[in-house]
Structures are given as C-alpha cells and as structure tokens.
Image (cartoon, helix red, strand yellow):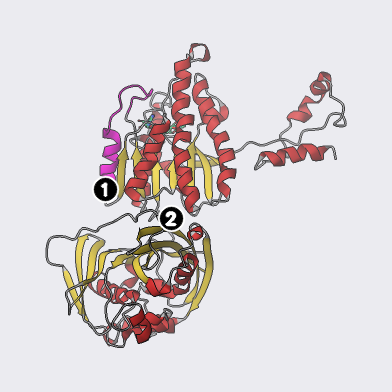
Amino acid sequence: MALNLDAIGRKIGPVTKEYGWKDAVLYALGVGAGFDELEFVYEKDLKVVPSFAIAVVFEFLSHIASGANINLAGILHGEQDLTMHAPLPVEGKLVTSGKITHMYDLGKDKGAVVVGESTTCDDKGRRLFSSTIRLMARLDGGFNGEASPKVKIGFPDRAPDFEIEDHPSADQPLIYRLSGDIFQLHVDPEFAKMAGFEKPIMHGLCTHGFACRALVKSLIPGEPERMHRLNCRFSRPLYPGDPVKIQIWKTQEGKAVWKVINAKTGETVINNGVFEYGDIPKDEIRFDGRVAIITGAGGGLGKAYALELARRGAKIVVNDLGGARDGSGEGSATPAQKVVDEITAAGGEAVANYDNVATPRGGENIVKTALDAFGTVDIVINNAGILRDKSFMKMEPEHWKAVLDVHLNGAYHVTKPAFAVMREKGYGRIIMTTSAAGLYGNFGQTNYSAAKMGLAGFMNTLKLEGKKYNILVNTVAPLAASRLTEDVLPEELLEKVKPEFVAPMVLFLASDRCEVSGRIYNAGMGCFNRAAVVTGPGTTLGDGTEEPAIEDIAANLSKIAAIKNGKEYFELNEAVADVINAFS
Ligand code: NAI
C-alpha cells in the first residue's frame, strides 16, 4: 500500500450531511459539556459548540483519508484549522466540497502528511465554514516527496491569561464516537495495541472540543457564535481519564493563542492553538486562507486593493518597484514596505516585494515571495503601471517598449509562474488592469492603449486555458485619482474618484463568489458597467464560393457595420461556426 499521489487536486464531494438538534447535543456531551453549560445540551435556546462544525462533516474527512489511500493503522489527526463564515445552525443540511491539496513526505520512519481543504455551505449555498485538515500518515512516508513546511506559533513569555482544568472521563471516547468518528483506535483495545498504544486513545477532535468549550467560556462566554477561527496541532495522544489544562493567552483584541496540557504527565497534547473571535459579519465576502499577489501595490489603486483584501483575511504580497511615474529611476523599497507596515499594524499578514514586473526573473521572484512566505498563490492582480505619453510621431521605440514591458509583458511574467501553482491546486483568480485609453482610445497614448488592449486579448485566451482548473480571468478598467492621473483628470474630479471606489469590483472578481471569466468591467466613482467585444449580425455577399467585389462591400457597408442584434462570442470557434453556418 502506498499513498495515491494522483489524488492531489482531485475534487472530493459534494458530500451532504443532515443533522438535528440531538446531534448537536450528543456532540456537546461527547466533548464534556454538562449542567454548567446548559446552552449546549438543552434544546431550549440551544447553541452549538462551534467545533461541532468539524465533527459533523467527519464523513467528508474520511473521504480525504480514503482518497489518499492512507494506511489506517498509522493515521492520526495532525492539524485542524477551522474558519467560520457564519454561525452554525442547531439543525440543517450541510454540503461539503474540497480536495486534497498536498502530500508531504517526512521520511520513511516518520511518515507523511496529507492536507485537505474544504468548504461547507448550507443547502441554500451560503458558506458556513472552511476547514484545512492535516492528517498524519505515520506508515506512509519515504516516497521522495516534498518536505512539509513548518509553522510555529509564538506563545507570550508569561503565565497564561486563563487556565481551565477539565476531566475527560475514562469512557469519553465511547460517547464522542457516536458523533461520527467510529474508528476502532478509540474503542477497540486490540486495535489500539496493534497501532502501538497501551489502550484506546481519545479522539484528537474530542480534546479539541474540550478546548473549544474552554476558549468560549474564557473569551466569549455565552456567545459561541462569535468564534471566528479555531486552529491547532495535535502533538501527543491523550488517554481517556487523564485530566487536562487548557492554557490561553490573549494576544490582541479578538485573538488568542492556546495549548492543551496533559495535567498528569505535563506533556503538551495540543499545541500551536489559535483562536479568533468577534462578530462574524453576515455573508461578508472573505479571503481567509487566500494568498494574493498585487503588483504595483505601493500606492494608488494597488494599495487600496491590498488594504481591503488584507482586512478581509487574505495574506498579501505587496509588490512595488518604487520607481518614478514613467518607470525611470533605481526604484525604492519604501512604498511597498509602508503598505506592508500598514497591513500588519492593523493585524493583517503581508510581505513586501520590490521586483520589477518587466522581466521574467522579476515575475518569478514575485511568485516565489508568495510561496516562501505563505505556501501558495490564489489571486493575482496585475496592476503595476507607468506612463510615457507622446503623440505618435514623437513616440520613440524606448517609450513604446517601456510601457509594453511593464503593462503587457509584466502581466505575462507574473501570471505565468502563478498560473502553474493555481493549475496544480485547481483554484485561481486573475485580474488584468486595462484602461479606457485602450478600450476606446486616448490622444498621445498609442503605447499605453496597445498594451492595455493587449491585456484584454491575453485574458480572452487565458480564460479558456484556466477554465478546467477553476482559474477565472477578468479585467478591470479603473478610473481613480492617483499619481498616474493627477495631471490627466480635472482637479475637481480628482477629489471624487478615490481608488477605494474601484476596489469593490476588483475584490469581487478576486473572490470565490465570482463565477464569471473573460469579462471587462469599467469601475470608478461608484459607476460600474461592462465593456465587451460585440459582433454584429452582418450580411453574406455571394454564395461563399465566389469572391465578392470591392463594390459589393461599398454597397452593403451599412448592413456589414450594423451592431444592432449583435452577439458576444466566448471563443474563436463560436465565431468561425457562425461563418460556416451562414452559408449552410
Ligand atoms: P500608480 O502610479 O499610483 O500605481 C502604479 C504602481 O505601479 C506604482 O506604485 C509604481 O511604483 C508601480 N510600478 C510601476 N512599474 C513597476 C514595475 N515595473 N514593477 C513593479 N511595480 C511597478 O497608478 P494607479 O493609477 O494606481 O495605476 C494602477 C493601474 O491602473 C495601472 O496599470 C494603470 O495603468 C491602471 N489604470 C489607472 C487608471 C486611473 O484612473 N488611475 C485608469 C486606467 C488604468
């Protein structure tokens, strides 16, 4: 038996699960709730222990294990990251879809790590929670795979702010298993011995539930629906009956780190805990767990995108060369670093990158920065830009080339390595930045217009190549006050057209709520519309075998040029099919 490496990226689900209030109560009893937390066990004004979210989709988790072909004698829950997007109802129907994203190799003796990501919605399609699970496959290592990246949570150097003692009973797993995880390791003494344990062990997720109750009790008493994120690493098995201490350090408003100690042995059984809490805005479009690259994000529009994406949970690579408006000069780290500082000061995550998008090397480095810092790339916003305006007769090759290199080639250089990552993971959102100058024309900007319209062509084909991998490619034509437009737009307009008015459109296109691909949207000042290439119905001249005369064109030009009743094609084949059909 070996891990099935082909399962990486393959979609799992949708797996549906219906549950009632008694399931929520049974879970609460399984994780130690009782008379002193009546809200979790009494159907009157019942509330759900938030960690129930993971237990209730156990069947989906087991599909990850079976899809990866993990040897069950060596399987353990390694890490669990749960993000709530809306409070879990006390009963309902859940629909979970996801995939295995990675299989890491720890070596023959240590085993492997299988990572699965999923999103769970209610039956109306409303996102309820997302999960990332890391399963330890202790008997499946040594396949010469990639090593697992290590993440360590820093604990404050002081006594915990809260320490809650709890006493899982000697029979705890017998109740907990009725919530779905009926794996023999937690009930069958023979199986437990075969797997190398003295006796059946606690389910990691059962101890996790004890910790969740303690965190709620300490930080959001009586308001479990305000839990936003629960993340941890299971570091040692715990035997039923061993007492535990849940240690909690509040690190900032809305955030705490935590661990669970075996009070008998002093060993840490759950480590690296993170707990985030606060009001979960209803149906807010979030980017938790997503990694976004924004080029030219040291100022103007890119900065507005970066700040809002970070505020909504994305991890950001803030790229900016920091050069002059026409792209000249050595460049400076300051603009990108300042945006990173602003994001981190607000509690977000970001790294700066100062590479030049105009070179293939620069593009690769930008994507490498995302992979090194955050392990992946989900979103690319190609935004970096310069201007070298000249009327056409004064447009020298260096003006032409510099502008095409940053806008058009720059988008290619960054998108290419990012697309490889997105294809692998089966998810991506790419945004190109065009301009009204390209779409409609603007005196003195032939270089810029050509580059900006080139991006629309780039999108048209990339949307086809990305489709099967859930990579959506769209384009925005912004209108905003920035250093690029400070002497182009009238002063009274500059005060009104803030970059923040463009950001909602770009962020929507960057979100998992976006389902369109290949679209161009104008956005500015709160005005939004779509621009498209529309092909008119035209006319046929002759029978398709004889060449029409030039005079036929002249005589029929108004019919040929008519756009009324025109249509949009999604790809070249549709347009060619219409030509062929016109004569059939
Ligand atoms: P901006 O000048 O404030 O932002 C562009 C950023 O790109 C700058 O911070 C600059 O340092 C950076 N940059 C330039 N060359 C770079 C390179 N080679 N590598 C990495 N970074 C580089 O201007 P704004 O207005 O925010 O422009 C953003 C995008 O929006 C540009 O692509 C621009 O063409 C486009 N656009 C803007 C419009 C507007 O009304 N502001 C209108 C239409 C398009």
- Quarter holding residue 246: bottom left
Total numbered circles: 2
Q: Earlier in the sequence, mark 1 or mark 2?
A: 2
Question: For the view shown, which residue lies furthest in the top direction?
Answer: 393
Q: Quarter of the picture for ligand 1?
A: top left
Label 1 sits on what residue type? Thr
Say which residue appears at 49% left-offset and 14% top-offset.
Answer: 395
174 to 384, vertically: above or below: below
Q: Is residue 480 above or below residue 387?
A: below
3D distance between C-alphas at marks 1 and 2 = 21 Å
In the rendered structure, which amino acid carries the disc numbered 2?
Ile
Marks 1 & 2, CB-CB < 8 Å contact: no
> Magenta region: which residues?
323-346
Magenta residue check for 328: yes
Q: Secondary structure at mark 1?
A: helix
10 Å crowding of disc 2: few (<14), some (14-19), many (20+): some
Image quadrant containing the C terminus: top right
Q: Residue at x 32, y 72 (%)?
A: 224
Which residue in the structure is indicated by mark 1? Answer: 344
Quickly name the residue at label 2: 285
| Magenta stretch holds residue 354 | no
User: How many residues crowd mark 1 within 10 Å: few (<14), some (14–19), many (20+)?
Assistant: some
Q: Taking 317 as reference, is 12 left or right?
A: right
**Residue 4 in picture, x, y percent from top left:** 49, 62
